[in-house]
Amino acid sequence: MQDLPDAETLARGLTAVLAGPDVRDSVRIESRTVNPYTSSTASELVTCDLRGVGRLELFCKYAAGAPADDRGHRGGLAYEALVHEHILRGSTKGPPSFYGAFPLSNTRVALVFDDVSGAVRVSKLPATPGMCGAAAWIGHFHASHALDAKHEAPIPLLRYDLDYYLGWADRTRRFAALERPEPRWLAGLCREFARLARLLVEGSLTVIHGEYYPDNVLVRETVVHPVDWETAAVAAGEIDLAALTERWPRVVADQCERAYRSARWGVETPASFHENLLAARLYLHFRWLGDRPEWTRAERFRSHWVALRSIAGQLDALAPSTGGD
């Protein structure tokens, strides 16, 4: 089990989290199964017996405490632990119950959650109850965690400012030009994004998930369980909605937008909502294309270029004689 702790280390860490740091030999590991959906973070499903309590089904994830250099987008697992402890625990229904964290080394940490076996990714469900339910959940979350420019979250969360947004567009342009000239319409689109990004900074702010994509939203018996909160930040809520609906048919996206607006604002949707959502979509495309040079022109990220070109056309950023890719 590559990148997973040995049985003794795991049992000792789980004992510290579940029974207390001064208790010894309180947890007996019964089984371990590598999470089939593991991506960049190693994780597993653990069945154990806790003395005096009984059998527990847990989900454990492991990673370095500090993330790679990504312009402050991810906070790492230690940061995610703080988000669960001080923002999600007790105030929000949905995210899996968080038991705590324990160190694996000076640089690695483990997080322990209640297992949500039987839950499925929201994309596997019919769109109306699944995606719309996820949109409503995050709308309620944004409404209950709204902040203004003078107030801080309970813990020092990442906060997106104008330099943060524009930096991703700048990186996309620089990385795109490494192999061949950048598309001729891109400069105009980036200028328009500079205007739109100000709306994301100056508008209403809230605590966001940061990567509220369908892969990070599980559903079990109609209950929405968002996972992987290491990208939580203070920013415009429309970013989470844009992530959820990316690449979905227009009819599904429209349904999700209505569910989100109703959950967050009721009948009084702000006039800037649609422009904010457009700015959020642009940010996400620049965010992925500007992450690292090898991603910018990779085939699997081509859909982001297609979407940017489409938005450029909508914004009249294309000159009449423009060709390019």
Image (spheres, helix red, strand yellow):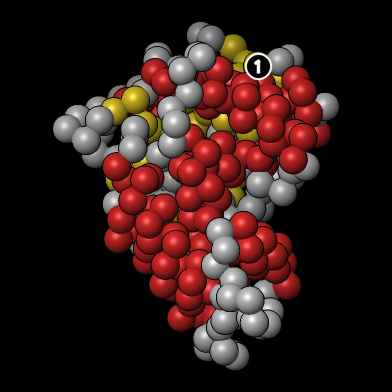
Residue 187 seen from this side: yes
Element under label 1?
A: strand
Q: Is residue 217 above or below residue 108?
A: above
Query: Where is residue 9 shown, x and y percent of the image?
Result: 48, 43
- What count of labels does the image hold? 1
The picture quadrant where one finds residue 99 is: top left
- In percent of the image, x 57 and y 89: which residue is there? 181
Q: Quadrant of the C terminus?
A: bottom right
Residue 100 seen from this side: no
Q: Is residue 67 above or below residue 188?
A: above
The picture quadrant where one finds residue 68 is: bottom left
Query: Where is residue 65 shown, x and y percent of the image?
Result: 38, 52
Q: Nearer the viewer, residue 61 or 270?
A: 270
- In percent of the image, x 57 and y 81: which residue is there? 184
Q: Which residue is most to the top? A: 52
Q: Which residue is mark 1?
A: 223
Amino acid type for the residue under numbered disc 1? Val
Q: Could you tell whether 214 is left or right of 9 in the image? A: right
- In percent of the image, x 38 and y 61: which residue is there? 194
Q: Nearer the viewer, residue 285 or 90?
A: 285
Q: Which residue is most to the left? A: 150
